[in-house]
Every structure is written in C-alpha cells, then in structure tokens.
Image (cartoon, helix red, strand yellow):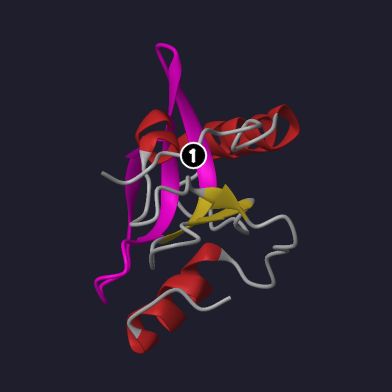
Amino acid sequence: MTRRFPRTEALIPHDLRNRLIENGRIAEDRDSFDPFPVVKLFTPDAAATWLITEAYPEDSDLRLFGLMDLGLGSPELGYAMLREIEDLRGKLGLPVERDLYFKAEHRLSIYAKLAHHAGMIVT
C-alpha cells in the first residue's frame, strides 16, 4: 500500500484564489478573455500538470479552468474540481504541489498551442 503524505498548507493560497475567482468573473462577461495562467500545479511523482487561469465557487469547492495534462500525451483545456486535485496522489503517495516559482510568460492560448505540438505542457 502506498503511503499518503498529508498536505501541510493550502494548495492555492487566498490571494491566488481571489485572482482566479476574479478571472472567472471576467471570463463570464467576455468571450474573448485569454488570461495569463495564475497557478501551475504538478504531481512531483507523476507526470500531471495544470495551468490554472480561472476559478468558479461551487458549494465549498472551486471549479478550476485551465490547461490540463494528466501525463498521457494529450493536454487539453477543461475544468477540474480543486478538492479532487487536492486528493490526488502519485505513485509514491505525494500530493499535488504548486510551482512556487512559476510566472506565466504567455497567455493560456499560447500555452495550449505549445502543449498541443509538444504533447505535454511546456513552461
């Protein structure tokens, strides 16, 4: 049985959550909204990566939107629930982490094009 390591802090801190929620509000009003990713999440012991641009509160959870790659060679734009990502563990039992040093250089559409050609998210 794989050991599950506990999370020691919030995966997405409040200031970044607020930016994601604000982006979600803007996206609801503007069809052409193409923001820079706010957060990069990854599995340290697997090949999954998420570039998150927006969040939408749902009950006590957040529905996240962004570029998602589960390490299967087919990254795609889509939605995921924060709680589900927080519960994920890789093969060594490590939780998903936030890349503390990630600073988006491109808008989401550019990352999506690069990922489509590379078969993985490239940052």
At 75% from the left edge and 32% from the top edge, which residue is drawn?
15
Where's residue 106, x and y in %?
Answer: 63, 72
Question: In the figure, is residue 67 to the left or right of 97?
Answer: left
Q: Is residue 121 above or below residue 97?
A: below
Question: In the figure, is residue 103 to the left or right of 36?
Answer: right
Report the label total: 1
In the picture, the quarter occupied by the N terminus is top left
In the picture, the quarter occupied by the C terminus is bottom right
Q: Main secondary structure of the magenta part?
A: strand
Residue type at numbered disc 1: Phe
Residue 59 or residue 83, whichever sits in front: 83
Q: Is residue 32 above or below residue 7?
A: below
At 39% from the left edge and 62% from the top edge, which residue is drawn?
48
Alpha-carbon neighbours of circle 1 within 10 Å: few (<14), some, or many (≥20)? few
Look at the image and say whether residue 69 sits in the magenta stretch. yes
Judge whether residue 29 can be spotted in this image: no
The residue labelled by disc 1 is 5
At 65% from the left edge and 57% from the top edge, which residue is drawn?
99
Residue 29 or residue 91, whichever sits in front: 91
Where's residue 5, x and y in %?
Answer: 49, 39
Question: In the figure, is residue 65 to the left or right of 11?
Answer: left
Magenta segment: 53-82
